[in-house]
């Protein structure tokens, strides 16, 4: 035990050891050591190190190493992500005689159309629930399938053009699928490849591989971030200690934490007073890709007469309270604001129809009705494109608004800031006074 | 009352002592065992402020310390304050 104490005594600064080291060693020889003495020596050594001129550097370095170790440890708790990749080729259409640039546009449009079909809600939902894939099992327990499909489409699948062949007669593109299980990543990439390859003119150049190395997280990068964060924190602590801000800082922190917690709880509870709003979505595709012409139908579908009829339909009875207070014209304007019709994903010749409403079943019913009206209006148009329903109106399972977590976090942040400011103004450190003994009343 | 600096000063009023003797003395009169790190942290601060000083000794390993005049004045001032606090608290407890 005494050897252990002597070893820890080496943590004291060299200058201190030169002055007090020998007598400190004598003290360690004399006493009967306990485990508490080890902690006491470490504590004493740290305080002594912090009182030296190089305290900034020392604390920064120690804090940086601790930060790096903690961050590296944390990186091992993050689930690994493996990416399986397949390479495909889309070739010329038989009998095509246009220029390479025209073919390029045509091939891109064709690729987009196939991609749209494969990434449609129905297609991905089928893949997620396929028994041999059985994807997102844990997520499906707590989230609606709609959200899982959206997450798969936006985060896990990536389809991108790699290059065009030198002869300009084919385009190479890749399909990536990311998952925490390498075998599952390969299986899904393979399933996606099969769907693509079933289209005429597409062939698989390189089948989906079995990934051996995780693409994320990068423990080195996280450890470096921890190192930098720890170093900055160490410098901050050293600065506070050197300038005697420890006690005052703790007081500000107390105000900020208290105020932040109260504001966070209050805003979190208050968010439940805000009514939920749901969005139902449908996707329509125009064939051929004359989206401009299809979008001209907006005017007809969103006309006052059309929307007023939907609003007043007895089964829907939309905006009931509002209609009692405001003229129908105003309610129609509000409905126009709640309907969103926009192009889907850039170049793809499709558009989404969305409706936002507090009742999720009514939101879905309205989108269904709007889709039906788009198709009717298209049929009545003299030279309309063929409209196809790619994704029917969804039944939203969870509200998109209000985001209670964000509201609570904002409340917490605002409350903390307010608390800090209150602390700054109300809890200023007392002005130092020269020590003076007050007269003893009992002596009188 | 448990400020290590005051306890070390109080121990040295009786006479010059080295580190271990101070530790044993404090344990006897205050019932408090100062760890070696805490004790030498207090000794370092007190010497820097000129309230204690090392004194020559025959023992080449153990360094005794003595209270200086300014250290004595500081301890007296602290004791007066403490005494007043103790007296006030005792009176209030009696009337509570």
Image (tube, rainbow, N blue to C red):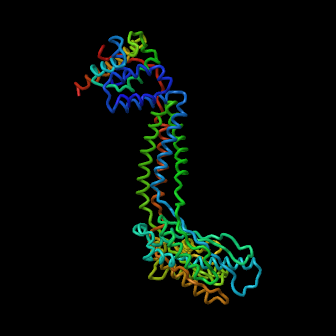
Q: Left or right? Give the position of A79 relative to B88.
A: right
Q: Position of residue B24 (x, y in %)?
A: 30, 20
The front one of A308 and A272 is: A272
Q: Is residue A428 visible to the viewer in this orientation of the structure?
A: yes
Determine if residue B74 is in view. Answer: no
Residue toward you, A261 or A362: A261
How many numbered marks, from 0 up? 0
Give percent across and percent down for residue A118. Answer: 55, 77
A4 versus A359 height, above or below: above
Quadrant for the N terminus of chain A in the image: top left
Q: How far from the left and from the top, in percent, is residue A393?
A: 50, 78
Q: Which image quarter holds the C terminus of chain A? A: top left
Q: Residue at x 50, y 78 (%)?
A: A122
Task: Choose between A269 and A180: the one closer to the eye.
Answer: A180
Farthest residue toward the right? A99
Quick check: A280 left or right of A294? left
Nearer-the-camera pick, A203 or A289 = A203
Residue at 62% of width from left, 79% of height from top? Answer: A203
Up the image or down, A71 lies above or below A214; here it is: above
Residue A314 placement (x, y as % from top left): 45, 82
Q: Which quadrant of the structure image shows residue A141?
A: bottom left
Which image quadrant for residue A332? bottom right
Residue at figure coordinates x 54%, y 33% from the top left:
A56
């Amino acid at each position: 035990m005494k050897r252990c104490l002597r070893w820890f005594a080496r943590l004291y600064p060299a200058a201190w050891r030169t002055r007090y080291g020998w007598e400190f060693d004598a003290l360690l020889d004399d006493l009967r050591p306990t485990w508490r003495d080890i902690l006491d020596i470490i504590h004493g050594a740290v305080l002594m190190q912090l009182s030296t001129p190089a305290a900034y550097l020392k604390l920064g370095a120690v804090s940086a190493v601790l930060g790096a170790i903690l961050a590296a440890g944390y990186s091992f708790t993050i689930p690994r992500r493996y990416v399986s990749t397949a390479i495909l080729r889309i070739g010329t259409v038989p009998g095509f005689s246009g220029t390479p640039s025209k073919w390029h546009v045509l091939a891109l449009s064709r690729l987009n159309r196939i991609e749209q079909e494969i990434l449609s809600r129905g297609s991905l939902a089928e893949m997620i629930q396929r028994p041999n894939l059985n994807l997102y099992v844990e997520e499906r327990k707590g989230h609606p399938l709609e959200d899982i499909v959206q997450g798969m489409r936006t985060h896990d699948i990536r389809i991108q053009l790699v290059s065009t062949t030198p002869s300009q007669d084919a385009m190479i593109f890749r399909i990536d699928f990311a998952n925490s299980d390498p075998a599952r990543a390969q299986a899904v990439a393979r399933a996606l490849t099969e769907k693509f390859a079933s289209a005429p003119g597409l062939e698989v150049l390189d089948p989906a591989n079995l990934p051996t190395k995780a693409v994320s997280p990068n423990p080195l990068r996280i450890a470096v971030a921890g190192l930098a964060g720890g170093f900055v924190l160490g410098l901050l602590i050293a600065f506070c200690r050197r300038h005697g801000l420890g006690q005052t800082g703790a007081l500000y922190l107390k105000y900020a934490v208290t105020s932040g917690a109260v504001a966070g709880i209050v805003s979190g509870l208050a968010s439940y007073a805000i009514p939920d709003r749901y969005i139902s979505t449908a996707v329509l595709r125009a064939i051929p890709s004359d989206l401009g012409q299809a979008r001209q139908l907006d005017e007809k579908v969103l006309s006052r007469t059309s929307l007023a009829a939907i609003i007043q339909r007895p089964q829907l009875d939309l905006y009931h309270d509002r209609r009692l207070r405001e003229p129908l014209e105003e309610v129609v304007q509000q409905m126009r604001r709640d309907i969103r019709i926009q192009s889907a994903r850039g170049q793809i010749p499709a558009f989404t129809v969305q409706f936002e409403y507090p009742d999720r079943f009514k939101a879905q019913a309205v989108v269904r009705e709007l889709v039906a009206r788009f198709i009717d209006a298209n049929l009545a148009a003299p030279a309309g494109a063929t409209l196809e329903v790619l994704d029917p109106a969804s039944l939203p399972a969870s509200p998109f608004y209000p985001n209670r977590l964000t509201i609570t976090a904002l409340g917490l942040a605002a409350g903390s800031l307010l608390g800090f400011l209150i602390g700054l103004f109300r809890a200023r450190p007392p002005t130092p006074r020269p020590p003076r003994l007050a007269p003893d009343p009992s002596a009188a | 009352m448990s400020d290590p600096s005051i306890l070390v000063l109080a121990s040295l009023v009786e006479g010059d002592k080295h580190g271990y003797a101070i530790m044993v003395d404090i344990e006897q009169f205050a019932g408090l065992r100062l760890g070696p790190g805490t004790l030498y942290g207090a000794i370092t601060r007190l010497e820097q402020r000129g309230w204690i000083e090392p004194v020559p000794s025959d023992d080449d390993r153990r360094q005794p310390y003595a209270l200086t005049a300014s250290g004595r004045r500081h301890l007296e001032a602290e004791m007066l304050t403490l005494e007043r606090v103790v007296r006030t608290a005792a009176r209030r407890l009696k009337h509570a």
